[in-house]
Amino acid sequence: MNTSINKQEQNGAIIAVKTNVRDTINDFFKKTMEKGIFDAILIPMQVPAGDSFVYVLLKDSSLLKDASPLSPIMSVQGAKAVSSITRLGKGHMKIAAFLRPCETRATIELTKLEQTNLDNITLISMDCPGVMPISDYIEDPTKAMKLFENAIKNEDDTIMRPVCQICDKSSMVAGDLHIGLLGAKKDTFFIIPSSEKGKQVLSDLDITVKDNIDSWTSKTQAKAEEKQKKRKKAHKELRLKTGALDNFLDTFAQCINCHNCMRVCPVCYCRVCYFDSDKVKHPSEDYLQKAESKGSIRFLPDTSLFQMGRMTHMSLSCVSCGSCEDACPMSIPVAQVFSMIADETQELFNYNAGRSLEDPLPLKAYKEDELREMEDDHD
Amino acid sequence: MDRKIGVYICECGPNISEKIDIDKVIEAVSSLKDVVIVEKYKLLCSEDGKNFLKEQIKKHNITHLVVAACSPREHQQTFMNVCENAGINPYLFQLVNIREQCAWITEDKEEATKKAIKLTKAAIKRIYYHTPLEKKQIDSNPDVLVIGGGIAGIEASLQLAKPDRKVYLVEKTSSLGGLVKNFEKTYPDMIPSAPFIQQKIEKVHKNPNITIFTDSEVTGILGFFGNFEVKVNQLAAENKTTDFDVGAVILATGSTLFDPRKSPQYNYGTVDNVITALDFEQMNLTGKIVLKNGKPPKSAAIIHCVGRDKKGYCSEICCMYSLKFIRYLKEKIPGILVTNFYSDLCIPGKSHQKFYEQTLGKNVEFKRAENIEIHKKGEQLDIKYRDENGNTNKSLVDMVILSPALEVPSDSSTLGEFLGISQDDGNFFIEEHEKLSPVSTSTEGVYLAGCTQGPKSIPDTITQAEAVTGKILSSLIPGKKIEPEVKVSYISESFCIGCKTCLDVCSYGCITFNEVKKISVVNEVICRGCGNCVAACPSGAATLKHFTFRQLYQELSEAVQ
């Protein structure tokens, strides 16, 4: 598990927190804009009504004071925002995208699929405490915000989403710069460069990278190990509940075919989802014939086929971000099931979605001996 | 369009009729939507059967034809031709394999009948969604790419280059002639080879229909018989890349010698006066046969079969050229003692035995030996070996000539990859069939000539070059039209998301990326319809004609009902 950066580069810079972490981060971005390092910042911000958070592309640095790098919910997956900006190629603006580790990893997957262009984008991530289920938050945003702040202070993840509670990559560094909160002394945090691009940003800001980050490394590693154990246990239990076909069908029986999970999924990037296309619309006699052979068929049709189809299509790139589960109006544990399947399929190919731009997508990296593996399995 | 589906079930003599209850199949499918007629016939592939089908199509105004019979590999084309003759598009046809997949795989008639019904129903479901596909004809390119400027490539080029057929001859080194230009004389006639090879090289240079690329390598070949796109990189011209089209490709990349350093017991490269057959030919051609100290050797040993144990095959020509070396030595250095250390002598052919017998004589020895080792002893070389009786012997000589195995140059594998041709254990390119098609390959339009296919003498090499020439002259006729594959892939502009996954999986390099629209585009002329892109496309934008999603879905869902 790549929870820390390369051994040779185990240095970072310790940044002193002035009033609070949020303001210090915002101030950091303000400086990058003033120095002309970035022309714009992509960062979460509270909506004017105060009851949600969205990504904004900030061009006016004075607005940065209202940015919310540590938002309590993930209403939009940041990778989708980065893709929206650069799908048709890089722009002239240099942009810093402030994303959670799972959003960063989804961005990397999308980059390998040519859906984003990172040439002018610097990816900056932060130790993620997790986010709350959107449904919990919107019941009482003010109360939720307090709960969230307390949870961070007490390092308590019980109010976070189930997939966040079993996330073993919440401090995984996959972008260019990473802000490390864990293991930092009181009123400080680490800023850790993890690419040449990241180093350049710090050097342009006259921040020297020579502070020891061992406390961050050991703390995040311990956390990742603990979460990994928790994740394995949770998946084992989930497999019992959802594994066999009947259980699977039961789990997704509540599905209303709204396809929200697909629409919010960062790595479901198809222009038109196959399951929304005419290809799954059949003449009425086909349905009648199916009803005849089975006694009855449910409508809308193909709900479980949709889930299985999506699983085969995107589980190799799934980053377990949990957006699908947040979007499900029927509270189906979509993200938990998908995270379980994703872990298993990615392990098959020794692949870890979003870990690095260098790892080729298993679908593209065809190896002849993979076929032999299949042959052996059938012997 | 009103669909009228005709279903015909072939009894295939007793093959199908005895194993499947055909009447039950007829009963099961007769009432399906749009099926207007279901009939059985004793042998549909016979002339009578084909006429029967044709008459039925006309009589019942059949628009879509389903035939339940044998494997598509057997008679798909037969029935498609019947469709064309009867005036319906051959792609509005589906063959159901109820022989190999039902009748022949079980003794249980009931089970076989059940499966035959399922498969026939599935085919009828599929054919609802068939659409007519039109064959296209494109001009074939009669030009030929010859890779390798040795004797095989030269011969083929000379035979093929005519005003209506250009030849592109690509040679990796700086000059034509290959290995042959190193030889003073050739066996068994001992005629000087320079005039014959130089004459041919001159003819190649003078022929206006041959374009020669020396110091060049082929860096890409895409396409198929009649329509290959070639890229050649000219190393001497600052890596200038030249593109051209040809209709056929001849691989005449020849062979090289096994490196005796891989068998350290011969001490080649570490001890003076141990040389290879090629070193010896060059020494003989360019000057005098002398030792390192400039003096002529008083005795020489020729070691046969160097590397044969490692390569695992006989290189065919080494015994004969070793005999030729005896002739060189005796002619140039009177009184020299020549000893041949061999394990088996391979001298087949109508004139070789005679050559061998005439070479024997005074001061020529043949010793059957194994476990040969060569060591320096003073100014001389000590040959330690085990003789036929199992005794260890020694022999002192001034010079040792090694006759190593022939092998294919290691850089040939990239060519194999472009062309989709496998190589055997010795890296030689594999012919389509050792006996029946020795110069064709599994890729139509790509041929082998000379040692690239296996060790070969000069006459055999020329024979192959001429055989390839015959193949090309008879099949790639200038002005002839070719029909590209009809069942090709296409990529929907409105579905393609531009992830380029298809570019990585296409086996034929026929997909390009439109950077303006950010979508992938299939070159339908090069596409062979393998379906890789369809399977890999994450957004369902790629479709294979005649294997559309809907056709497969309908067929499968019926089959698994």
Image (spheres, grey):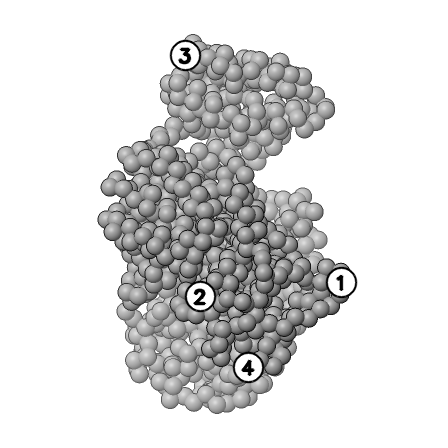
Q: Is residue A89 visible?
A: no
Q: Is residue A211 rendered to the left or right of residue A97?
A: right
Q: Chain of mark 1?
A: B
Residue occupied by mark 2: B284
Marks 4 and 2, Cα distance to the nearest angstrom? 62 Å
At 41% from the left and 78% from the top, the residue drawn is A196
Residue occupied by mark 1: B390
Quick check: do tags 2 and 3 share a chain? yes
Q: Chain of mark 3?
A: B
Disc ID at residue A228: none
Marks 4 and 3, Cα distance to the nearest angstrom? 79 Å
Q: Secondary structure at mark 4?
A: helix
Name which residue type carries label 1.
Gly
> Residue A189's x, y, as percent?
50, 84
Q: Earlier in the sequence, mark 2 or mark 3?
A: 3
> Residue B478's x, y, as percent?
29, 36
At 45% from the left and 47% from the top, the residue drawn is B459
Residue occupied by mark 4: A7
Residue occupied by mark 3: B58
Q: Earlier in the sequence, mark 3 or mark 1?
A: 3
